[in-house]
Amino acid sequence: MKRNTLSRVTRTPVLHESLFRGLDQLLNDETFSPFGALSREGLRTNGWMPPVDIRETADTFEFTAELPGLTKDDVSITIEDKVLTLAGERKWNDEETKNNYHRVERAYGTFTRAFTLPNSVDSDKVAAKFEHGLLTVSVPKADEVKPRQIKIN
């Protein structure tokens, strides 16, 4: 009986060691490491994807993107073939690398978000505003698809 007990005890640390070694390798991979955003070359800028809310009103489709730390000059908006594209870049300030960061959780680099619009929009009348880190793009519906009240005679 002692032999079986001892045998189990000696195998368990080997299993744990193997498991923890694999886990350690996984966590030290730049993809999963909390320090993965910082590499020898500096900050990794693979891109990011800001969240966007899409709302439909009677007259418009409204796209609101969360872009903290950016200005309107950091963002471009295009419409081509009924596709609304928001693109931009959050740049890493090289002076920041001198501040001995332990963790960088904010995303840096370029982003692109594209949304297919319905055929029933008037892309010539698109309006955009940027306030407090929120970009709001209003895409009006074409007049022929807006709901209208019909008067009964």
Image (cartoon, rainbow, N blue to C red):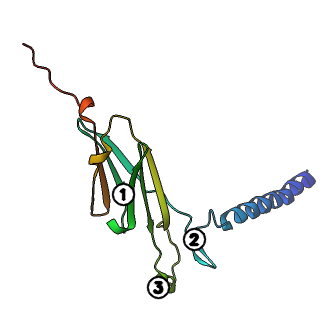
Where is residue 69 shown, x and y percent of the image?
A: 36, 69
The type of residue carrying mark 2 is Arg
Residue at 76%, 64% (x, y): give it: 21
Residue at 25%, 38% (x, y): give it: 57
Considering only vertical position in the picture, is 144 above or below 113?
Answer: above
Compared across the picture, whether 128 is left or right of 32 comes to left
Residue 5 visible to the viewer: yes
Q: Name the residue nearer the viewer: 83 or 100.
A: 83
Q: Secondary structure at mark 2?
A: loop
Callout 1 crowding tier (Cα within 10 Å): few <14, some 14–19, many ≥20 = some
Residues tagged 3 and 1 counted as in contact (Cβ below 8 A): no
Considering only vertical position in the picture, is 80 above or below 27?
Answer: above
Q: Which residue is mark 3?
A: 95
Q: Earlier in the sequence, mark 3 or mark 2?
A: 2
Where is residue 58 shown, x and y percent of the image?
A: 23, 35
Where is residue 53 shown, x and y percent of the image?
A: 36, 47
Q: Which residue is mark 2?
A: 44
Q: Quarter-wise, where is residue 30 in the image? A: bottom right
